[in-house]
Image (cartoon, rainbow, N blue to C red):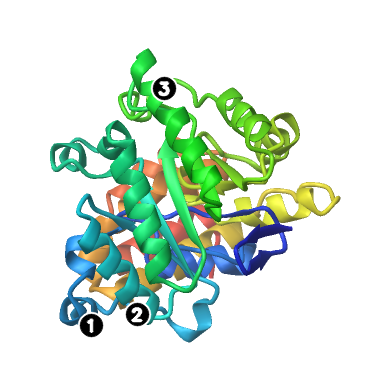
Amino acid sequence: MLKLGDLCLDIPLFQAPMAGYTDRAMRHLARRYGPVLTFPGVVLAKVACHRRIVAKLKLAAREDEHPIGIQIMGSLVEEMVEAARNLRGCGYDLVDLNFACPAPKVLRRERGGSILRQPELALDIFRRVREAVDCPVMVKLRAGYDDSEAARDSFWRLCEALATEAVDALVVHGRTVFQRYRGKADWQILAELKRRFPKTTILGSGDIFSAEVIRQRLAETGVDGVTVARGAVGNPWIFRDARAVLTGGAEPPPPDLQEQGATIMEHFEMVAGLSSESRAIHYFRKFYNGYTKYHPERRQVQRALCSSTDKNELFSIVRSWYSAA
């Protein structure tokens, strides 16, 4: 089990928030296959601190999505507090504070991972948000801003302060902000975190692409859980496989071609229902790399799917390659 404040998850993993990916459609598929906690994409505090905008953007959690968390990103204390209060009022069960995002446009605005250079600000935001909401509050970090000694020192000081403040969980990606997604995630820093702060819930992030890797990371580092981000894009089966492995069973065989095709079409239908068919065709292309992972003719199928220009053409291609009704 994984305990996050008053939330108890029956397996130690969940789907991480990803801007531009974890919409209602992706969350629906993820929950079907395994995790009991999902997130929308990260929400900017400057947006969520205005109740009218929150209502206009339809950010409220749906009744069939509980438990569901929300990740907030910003650098102004009062905005972060008001955003957390508003989103908690929209039905979210957990608040996650993003001090990790490495996107250049985020760093230019001194949000996300930029805040790792200001540990006192990060700690102040956490304290004020925790006082403002009656739900668990997690903090998402990266393993320092860069590889400098000063950055590592700031990282460890912030982790120690948050552990002392009894943060509900620290979610740490094993790369620095400067690395973005280059190289391999350093999971030894996760193991060291758990050794230093054994009473703090530590969750690891980075390069989680299979159930076996999840099992290995939990065993090797002693962390309390993992978050699945890019490994779930076009691959909702990772949650089914992880649940089987973590509850003592064998990893299930890969989904057959018919199940793969049916899932692709169902996912597309849900995405189109959230916007429009024309927008969905372009938006959905980011999922093809994951969805074709299990197909024996992966490259050819991926090219064919990307060539589709409307729903009918897409579904015809899926049926041709996947023998799906």
Q: Classify residue 293 as left or right of residue 103.
A: right
- Report helix, strand or loop for mark 3: helix
The numbered mark, 1 or 3, whose residue comes first in the sequence reads 1
Q: Is residue 12 above or below residue 220?
A: below
Residue 89 visible, this orientation: yes
Residue 265 visible, this orientation: no
**Residue type at tag 2:** Ala
State the image coordinates of residue 195 (x, y, percent, origin top left): 68, 30
Q: Is residue 248 above or below residue 113?
A: below
Q: Classify residue 248 as left or right of residue 28.
A: right
**Residue type at tag 3:** Asp
Instruction: Measure how far apart labels 1 and 3 are at the Cα level.
Output: 41 Å
- Which numbered marker is on residue 60? 2
Q: Is residue 62 above or below residue 143?
A: below
Badge 1 is on which residue? 55
Instruction: Measure how far apart labels 3 and 2 are at the Cα level.
Output: 38 Å
* Closer to us: 300 or 41: 41
The numbered mark, 3 or 2, whose residue comes first in the sequence reads 2
**Residue type at tag 1:** Ala
Residue found at the very far bottom of the displayed protein:
63
